[in-house]
Amino acid sequence: MDKIFYLFNYINQFKLMNQVMVEQNKGQFKILLDDDTYRLVNEWYNNEGEKIFRKYFGTSFLTYEAIIITINLFGKRKIEAIGISTSINKRSLQTLSYSINKILNQYVYVSNKQINIPDITNLCKKNVPHLTALDSAELVNFMESDEQESFILPNVRSGV
């Protein structure tokens, strides 16, 4: 529920009302898929029904924007990192972590079925200038108050 403002603004900004069904009372949303996308999503699972990640997905479907949205929607602030829980099997988790590392050009590690992105201040410094105001504000919310002050105040003074 703490991401509802971000989600609604994102849906409105990109005019996705027909592709996303929000169930506020359940705290859930469903993405309505066309036939091609439905087939693609089914490729995310192996014959045992485990969610997998193949390296070739990285170039086409794991985009910079998708990673930022995933961090903003599903990331949780931990003491040392932003953690993103995943249901991807262990064998694919390292590949996903490597792909995110390469796309963000930021150290990423795996721990307890989570993708972890440490050095949140650096993540914000490198990415906020390239993001929309909505994505930037949400990403900066992962920083502690003292981190935000050291990040935001110098940029405000210099006119960035």
Image (cartoon, rainbow, N blue to C red):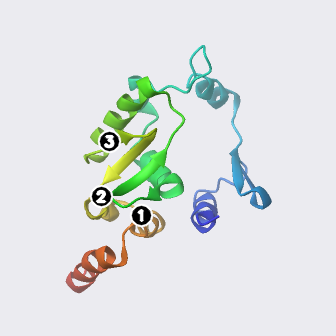
Label 2 sits on residue: 123
How many angstroms separate mark 2 from mark 3 (CA)? 14 Å
Instruction: Say if 91 sits above or below 18 in the image.
Output: above
Label 1 sits on residue: 139
The answer, for residue 47, to whether it is visible in the render is yes
Q: Do the residues labelled 2 and 1 touch (CB within 8 Å)?
A: yes
First in sequence, mark 2 or 1: give its number: 2
Q: What residue type is labelled 2?
A: Leu
Left or right relative to 111: residue 154? left
Instruction: Say if 160 sits above or below 43 in the image.
Output: below
Give whichever of 51, 65 is nearer the camera: 51
Per the image, label 3 sits on a secondary structure element best described as strand
| Rendered location of residue 52, percent (x, y) | 50, 25
Instruction: Say if 70 sits above or below 113 in the image.
Output: below
Q: What residue type is labelled 1?
A: Leu
Left or right relative to 86: residue 148? left
Residue 40: image quadrant is top right
Give whichever of 15, 96 is nearer the camera: 96
Left or right relative to 142: residue 153? left
Label 3 sits on residue: 109
First in sequence, mark 1 or 3: give its number: 3
Which of the labelled discs sits on residue 152, or is there none?
none
Q: Residue at x 41, y 31 (%)?
A: 93
| Rendered location of residue 95, percent (x, y) | 36, 29
Q: Which amino acid does label 3 sit on?
A: Tyr
Number of other residues with Cα within 10 Å of mark 1, as a class: few under 14, some 14 to 19, many 20 or more: many
Q: Residue at x 46, y 38 (%)?
A: 113
Residue 101: image quadrant is top left
Give whichever of 122, 77 is nearer the camera: 77
Per the image, label 1 sits on a secondary structure element best described as helix
Q: Which residue is drawn at 27% across and 74% down?
A: 151
